[in-house]
Amino acid sequence: MTIGLDGAPPTAPAATSIDVAAERARTLGASARHYFNAAGAGLMSDAVVARMIDHLRLEQRSGGYEAANAVVDEITGVYEAAAAVVGADADEIALFDSATSGLRGLFDALRLGEGDTVIAPRSSYVSQALRLLALQRHDGVNLVVVPNDASGAIDLDALERALATASGRVVVSSVHVPTSSGLVEPVAAIGRLARAHGALSVLDATQSIGQIDVDVRAIACDALVTTGRKFLRGPRGTGFAYLRRGALDGIGAWAPDVRGSVWTGPEEWTMDGGARQLETWESSVAARLGLGVALREAVDRGLAETEAHLVGLAARLRERLAGIAGVTIADPPASASGIVTFSVEGAVGREFSAGLRAARIDTIAIPASHAQWDLGERGLPSVVRVSPHVYNDDSDEAALIARVEELAAEARR
């Protein structure tokens, strides 16, 4: 399906083949609560948790290094599974403890300075926006924040103008799906424009990998980062990056480490030519093994099938929520992802989300401080974010709608 790649209007999703009952049966958390926070941290499957515990037991018995030596081939398989998810090769994958760490490593490696340019969308997440603002303040990098068009997505004409007038080395720091809405940016068009102007395209796919079928070759992406804990349903403390082969040629990692480098003489070292030059040595092997299980589950379930299912589910939720008095959908028109955001007349987002949680319905409130270029620009102090996954069934949806109706009515009194 691969929605949102060229900015085309979303089409009505077809019926999907996801076996929701089977997903619930192998997800312990799905039976305890009505869980709608996959965009924060998706519920891990029983198999993911079991694999992590098994390895921790092995570490307990034999020590961390010895246990790691016993699973070298399985760890290699994690790189291969991550590559399969995004359409890359295994040597183009680096593992991190978070998407933020991956972005930091990439931008450190680029060594941007006075006169170089970074171009970013208004949908940038707080961690990346602050990193770019710091580059502007402390390193003299020119930062250009591109406006949106009428659909709420990045204005591609404005992006092309920014690229045409940019100075120095140019990086387009794009976002696929933001934290603050269900928006899907036209990442293929962004990638093609960046490549046509000789700019490097770095994509924050934290909120899309696992819910949207992404092929890094198709979207002309030079680098991509994502987390394991969200729609991939992996453990916290995991993430990975894709780095196009040759993208850092002539630059090299800013902080070489024993993980991706070899110290060959008193003042000499060689570096891994692939993405692992960005890695550092220490990691949770158990967490990475759990991530590997989650990645393989995502591939086995079907990336396109998962996308179609979640897009359809979110579209239905938007329609039902919009029909509740006092509720306003906050997603812009270019929203065709599995994330739904809304505000409620007379209610504060955090308090409204807490009212849902009291009924065992998990959502989250996103404050403007997490998305100043988006929510702040739109004058929204916060929104309530609902993000379902393949383990949500009709009973979850019914509970959510009923509770929102109840709380919205209370807020209007």
Image: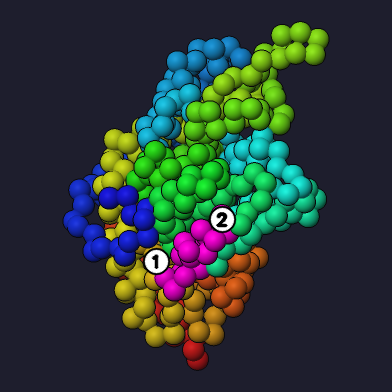
Task: Report the amino acid beneath label 1.
Answer: Ala
Magenta residue check for 189: no
Kindly report the distance in space between the C-alpha atoms of the residues bearing marks 2 and 1.
25 Å
In the depicted view, which residue is nearer to us: 234 or 117? 117
Magenta residue check for 149: yes
Answer yes or no: do the residues labelled 2 and 1 have beta carbons within 8 Å? Answer: no
Please tell me which residue is depicted at 59% across the width and 27% down the height of the picture. Answer: 249
First along the sequence among labels 2 and 1: 2
Please tell me which residue is depicted at 32% across the width and 58% down the height of the picture. Answer: 311
User: What residue does disc 2 label?
Assistant: 164
The part of the chain drawn in magenta is 148-163
Please tell me which residue is depicted at 56% across the width and 75% down the height of the picture. Answer: 378
Secondary structure, mark 2, is helix
Task: Report the amino acid beneath label 2.
Answer: Ala
Q: Can you give x and y, in whole percent of width and height, for residue 188 in the image? A: 40, 50
Checking the image for residue 334, the label placed there is 1
Checking the image for residue 263, the label placed there is none
For residue 150, above or below residue 43: below
